[in-house]
Image (cartoon, rainbow, N blue to C red):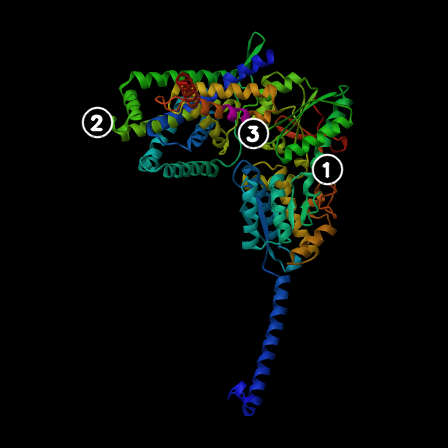
Amino acid sequence: MKKLLGRRFTGRGLGRGALGLAAGVAALLVSMACASAASQSTTQSPKEVVLGVLMPLSGASSLDGQNSLRGVQLEADTINARGGIKSMGGAKIKVVSVDATSDPTTAVSAMQQLITNSKPLAVICCYSSTLTQAVMPVAERNNIPVISSSVADVLTNSNFQYIFDTAALSSQIGNAQIQLSQEVYTAAGRPIKKVAIVYEDGTFGSGNAAAQTKQATSNGLQVVLNEAYHAATLTDATPLAAKIKNAAPDAIYSTGYINDSVLLVRALKSDGVSAPIVGAIGGFVDPNFGTSLGAQANGVFAVNVADMTRFPELSKAYQSKYNDKLSATPLFTALMTDIFAEALETKATTDTTVLAQTMHTHRFTKGLAGEMPGGFVDFGTSGRDSAAVVLLQQWQNGALVTVWPLTAQTAKPIL
Amino acid sequence: MLGLAQAVLNGLLIGGVYGLITIGLTLVFGVMKVVNFAQGEFLMLGMFGAYFAWRLFGLDPAVSALGIGLIVGLLGVLVERVVIEPIVHATHLSQIFATVGVSLILLNGAAVVFGNDYYSVHTAYQTSTLALGELRLSVPNLISFGWAVIMVIVLQVFLFYTDVGRALRATAQNRDAAILMGIDPRRMFMMAFGIGVGLTAVAGAVILPYTTVTPQSGQQYIVIMFTVMVLGGLTSIRGTLAGGLVVGVVQSVSTVFLPTSLENLVVFLVFLAALALTRSDRTRPSWPMRALRLRSRAFRQS
């Protein structure tokens, strides 16, 4: 045994060595316990909590990406100025933004980069349904809650556990486009019978169009044209307008982004098409639609997910900070920031899984969530806000006003 | 039948626009043998220039177009001196990297300066149409088409009837021979690039009334530009206008029979067919002609 252990490990030195070893182990255990207690107290009261923002800051969707980021920054600054997350010792919200670009493949690596480098507690993403759908698997693998306002049904129909979507379903929006406008025209004694459905061929447009077609057919309307176009390469809408004119619809339902929507409305007006146009969020409700078309925008309908006139304080703050009009895009990201803060106030945590659990079970009523048309935001188990509503609005004198349903009406529809 | 006739007419008008925006690209490639991937961004700058001329001075884009073209052309001369001249004799890869770099700088620079909003002018004739029997002509498109024709004529006169124009053509045909004739190729390159991007900026100003402008706008047109340039024979100005008309008509007519989302697919199919069937080298017959000659030779020998 002596030969195996060597001269050091003889009986004589063993007593003193064993004592030293035991003392060392005890010291190590104590310091580990202290460190654990200290880290537990710092994880519950960190100096800051990281809120990731993954938005298309370049490419075709850059305007909406930029406006989305603005909504988060504005609301995060407001919350921090009020004292931060009080349940976490006044931790400030730190907004970390990464450019998703307008390409889904790049968005995936951008999400990975954001998660790896900044370890966010949650991520607000990605405006476009196509981008949000692309990055969700990355978020799921890393257990990071994603708070979104992308409308595509597939986002909350795919068993994602970590998506929290504040917008109405694409199918809900598509249904409302047909239903609400039909109600308006029936009430005016000019029922709609034939409809043309035109849309951008991405996830956003196609999803909406499918819902519109289903609702139109179910309401007994005749779909005289169902036409997709590619928004990114649409340089001339004249052929599309000619097709619509030849189909002679009573109303035109369109889903697209800013440039293509402007081109389409201009081409329809040029061609003397007088049938009402009903757009769906996206380009049709953006302030740029109104400023680009000027008087030609007047009379165009659009379904929207919020009424900006109900948020005068936020509108004022946004205008003052960015010299720009508040639209649905930054309103919703400001709402998402409020939701993030309220979730942490409800249950302080630095664990993303615990945060996700809170977001599934809690009914959000504070701040902007309480001012939404439904009065609250509730994601439930599906991850989709059950209180999301769709309003029919109309461009009148360069501004969007709510014309239907009557309970939310701020101006009469001009037919 | 009327629908088809209207589609052809619409296609010719928009085709004129495509030709107009591409003429500058053709001139740059013809003289310098450099493919300018930033051409779309100079189009975008022309559109922005026209927008601000309208907003600040109330000038209609059709009126401010030439002035905008001149300003952007001078910017083009600066870009040529700093970026393009050092790589004129470099490999194609270096040239691609350089012009793509210019494209990124201009696009993102515009986003920093102007933001990402969409801007548009409001003119009295924006949604006006003229009647031609039962057919309708869009007035903004007609104006753009008119500009396209004028620009082609002016450029042809410049290239064929002025000393400078002849010097440019000589440099395009044979750089070394042009040097031997006392032509300074550096001056020719500066001029070609400046005029080339200036022409595209004029086009940008002229098309603004019927569309919007944002820093990304150039990227929307760049694929069309290259398609039209190649269809037009790469170096021919008249060919570029013809190529534009072909693309416009194919795009417009295809939407009569097929979904709108396939309009560019048809354009590219026609483009591929044209590449396969037309001669790129006048001394060498196209492959169908070669195949025919081989067959008839074999037949005679048998």
Cα–Cα span, label 2 and label 1: 76 Å
Residue A360 in picture, x, y percent from top left = 72, 50
Please, what is the three-letter code of the amino acid marked with disc 3? Asn
Q: Nearer the viewer, mark 3 or mark 2?
A: 2
Please, what is the three-letter code of the amino acid marked with disc 1? Val
Image quadrant containing the C terminus of chain B:
top left
Q: Which residues are magenta?
A: B264-270
Q: Which mark is residue A259?
A: 3
> Mark 1 — on which chain does it sit?
A
Answer with the quarter of the image where residue A202 lies: top right
Residue B294 in picture, x, y percent from top left = 41, 21
In the foreground, A334 or A56: A56
Query: SS for tag 3?
Result: helix
Cα–Cα span, label 3 and label 2: 51 Å
Residue A278 in picture, x, y percent from top left = 67, 26
* Disc 1: which residue: A389
Q: Is residue A12 left or right of residue B87?
A: right
Please, what is the three-letter code of the amino acid marked with disc 2? Leu
Q: Which mark is residue A233?
A: none
Residue B192 seen in the current view: yes
Q: Is residue B268 magenta?
A: yes
Q: Residue at x 53, y 20 (%)?
A: B250
Residue B163 in picture, x, y percent from top left = 26, 19
Residue A179 seen in the current view: no
In the foreground, B47 or A151: A151
Dominant secondary structure, magenta: helix
Q: Residue at x 63, y 32 (%)?
A: A285
